[in-house]
Amino acid sequence: MNLLLKDKVAVITGSSQGIGAGIAKAFANQGAKVVINYLSNHLKAGELVDEIIEHGGKAIAVKADIAEPSDITQLFETTIDAFGRLDILVNNTGILEFEVLETITPENLQAQINTNLIGTILATQKAAALMATDGGSIINISATTSINPLPGTLVFSATKAAIDNITKVLSKELGPRNIRINTIAPGMTETEGSHEKGIIGSAFEKQNISITPLGRIAQPEDIAKVAVFLASDDAAWVTGERIQVSGGQL
């Protein structure tokens, strides 16, 4: 069996559950050694590591707040200590808060910017330094709202639009070092978070399905399959791209 990511080392931020966990499992199934990053849900992270190991893969869990520069440094230091190299980074961690303009607070605004935007930049900076010798693949997780924003998603949509722009800029900066960087923009996806926010089963979900040509919302594995492609040598000539994974929804 030809494993697309055999012996690659991948860090996936915010990967104890949801889309991040789906990507981590898919990477491990393709031969990668994966670093499960979590902030508070150590039980989920531990269960995911155990699941990957039980299926013959290699994984560790590392607690790190992507909004904290010192935590980002520790995340990559731990990765190198455990696996000796870094080949893939998935910037998956993100905060989504539904709020209209009148209810946005400076604290909430800064929290989303720190995690969604600044954390992505700083994690990419650390990863690129570690990929300097052999190159690598960086995958940013954006959202359909980066180009088709919805009311009540002002800050989230703004940070995701910035992620799209970061990808374009860094593809030009990092290309000469054989570091590819691309964006995946998922549509509505069934995750623990979408359940917790009351999206699944709501009128909002039904409306979303009604405008999706493929007639459903995504599962984490739908996003993970595209991430595997972008991380692999099959995408060796792909960089600076934004791939929308939304079942045909614009």
Image (cartoon, rainbow, N blue to C red):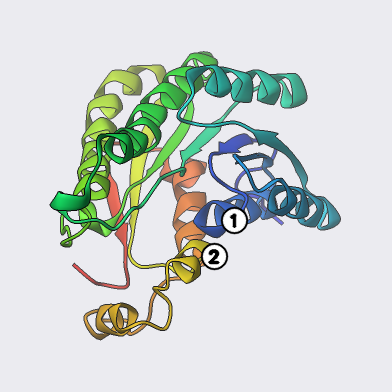
Provide residue 112's location: percent of width, then percent of height.
34, 39
- Amino acid type at circle 1 is Gln
Provide residue 218's location: percent of width, then percent of height.
42, 71
Which residue sits at x=61%, y=25%? 75
Quarter of the image for residue 58 reads: top right
Q: Secondary structure at mark 2?
A: helix
Q: Is residue 231 above or below residue 170?
A: below
Does the CB distance between marks 2 and 1 fall below 8 Å?
yes
Between residue 112 and residue 169, name the one nearer to us.
112
- Alpha carbon distance from label 2 to label 1: 7 Å
- Which quadrant does the C terminus fall into? bottom left
Which residue sits at x=33%, y=44%? 183
Which residue sits at x=53%, y=14%? 133
- Amino acid type at circle 2 is Glu
Provide residue 109's location: percent of width, then percent of height.
27, 38
Q: Which mark is residue 248?
A: none
Quarter of the image for residue 47 reads: bottom right
Q: Which residue is mark 1?
A: 17
- Callout 1: few (<14), some (14-19), or many (20+) C-alpha neighbours within 10 Å? many
Q: Is residue 122 above or below residue 247?
A: above
**Sequence-wise, which precedes: disc 2 or disc 1?**
1
Between residue 231 and residue 198, name the one nearer to us.
198
Q: Is residue 140 above or below residue 199?
A: above
Between residue 9 and residue 178, name the one nearer to us.
9
Q: Which residue is mark 2?
A: 192
Which residue sits at x=23%, y=55%? 153
Provide residue 91's location: percent of width, then percent of height.
45, 38
Q: Secondary structure at mark 1?
A: loop
